[in-house]
Amino acid sequence: MSIKDLLIVEFAEGVAGPCCGLQLADLGARVIKIESSVGDRTREWGPPMAGDDAAIFAHLNRGKESVVLDPAKDSDCEQLDAILARADAVVAQNDPGEEHNPDWNALARAHPRLVVCEIDDLGPAGPLSGFPGSELAVQAMSGFTRYVGDPGGAPCRVGFEIAGMAAAMHAYQAMAAGILHRARGGTGQYVRVSALNSLLSMKTILLIAQGGDVDEWKGFHLNGPHWPADTGWPTKDGQVTFDFRADQYDDWVAFCEKMGLGHLKDHPDYKDWRTTVHTGDRRFVFGEPYRQVFAKMTSDEVNAAVNGAGGTSLKYHTYGEVLAHPQVQILEPLVDVPDENPAARKQVGSPFRTMGEARRTQYTRAPHLGEHTQAVLAEFAAAPIERKRAAAGRGA
């Protein structure tokens, strides 16, 4: 079975579920998005807007079909069941406590070859299982906010939707694994992914299970709560990174001599030279000689000097600079959605690149609310006998 043969039902709104569905839609699967009569809440998450809908909705839901169904109505539940009978997988994300939330575990049992991935914020059980989570709540609960800001300062939210995107990618992996399992002769699967557990699983390098007081643990990449924020080195027109690897002492010496700082190699404060450059908070005290030199140079000049000596220096980019950089342009991160509102025609595409196959660069726009309701319901209601046979076959 090709991914283009897959039928995915998306019963989700917000970031995590729709982003999971987007990965599959971008790869060519057919994704039917089930919405309430008021629509996915991200339709209103503007500005910026792309016509009547927010730009974030346009991005997360391109290439999908929108069908309006109300799970509180028996007739709509029957229509949803008809679609599920022919679907391959479901990504579901419902706010906890909603009276008419579908029972996805029961629906998975009713359609034994269906792969169902249900996403929640804080987990399906426990004292906070019914808590109406959010991006901020999950970040706070996971401890990610401890690793942003300055030592002793207030914990800070990561501005990016890191919890939602982490849950999306883990859900996508779970669905892909379930579909592969079924394709190799197994049955469908019912799996759950929580945003909280997704963030915890991403903290492997932080060794949160090492025992003792984790906030007192010190080591490579583990000093978050105690380490000053990794800000850049100021130049005349911005900030840059500045580093030489541990085995590049000779390169560092050559660089210092070129910059008029050759005396540093013999100074006792620079015996542990690398902690004055990148790894360690000593750079905030003993980095002053570099800082004075960089302040008189442009970012490009610092980049050229450091990189030319074998080190690593890149400018801290604005988004405009990111998209204009030749390295980013080579990656071709953007795709075109020609029938979308001009405000959202250019969007960030999938990072997948398949060797030997032409990359898909054009996609269809995100659907208007309920745009495909009549056509889809007519399609899945047109042949009830065949539908029953298909459902029976999937239960074999």
Image: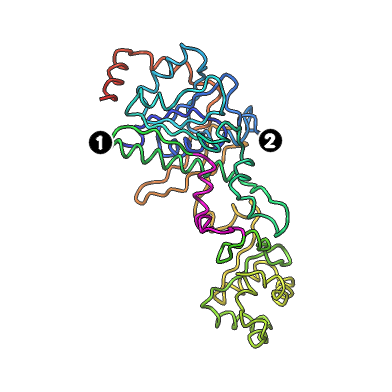
Q: Quadrant of the rendered structure where residue 245 is? A: bottom right
Q: Quadrant of the rendered structure where residue 176 is? A: top left
Residue 257 x, y percent position in the rendering: 64, 84
For the residues marked 2 and 1, what is the alpha-carbon distance in whole angstroms?
Answer: 47 Å
Q: Is residue 315 left or right of residue 122?
A: right
Residue 7 x, y percent position in the rendering: 38, 29
Q: Quadrant of the rendered structure where residue 137 is? A: top right
Between residue 209 and residue 348, name the one nearer to us: 209
Question: Which mark is on residue 210?
Answer: none
Secondary element at tag 1 = loop
The magenta span reads 194-215
Secondary element at tag 2 = loop
> Crowding at label 1, few (<14), some or many (≥20) Cα neighbours within 10 Å?
few
Amino acid on which the number 1 mark rests in the picture: Gly
Residue 213 x, y percent position in the rendering: 59, 58
Residue 200 magenta-highlighted: yes
Q: Which residue is mark 2?
A: 47
Label whose residue precedes the other's in the sequence (2 or 1): 2
Amino acid on which the number 2 mark rests in the picture: Pro
Q: Is residue 76 left or right of residue 391?
A: right
Residue 334 magenta-highlighted: no
Q: Which residue is mark 1?
A: 185
Between residue 147 and residue 54, name the one nearer to us: 147
Compared to 372, does 262 lie above or below?
below
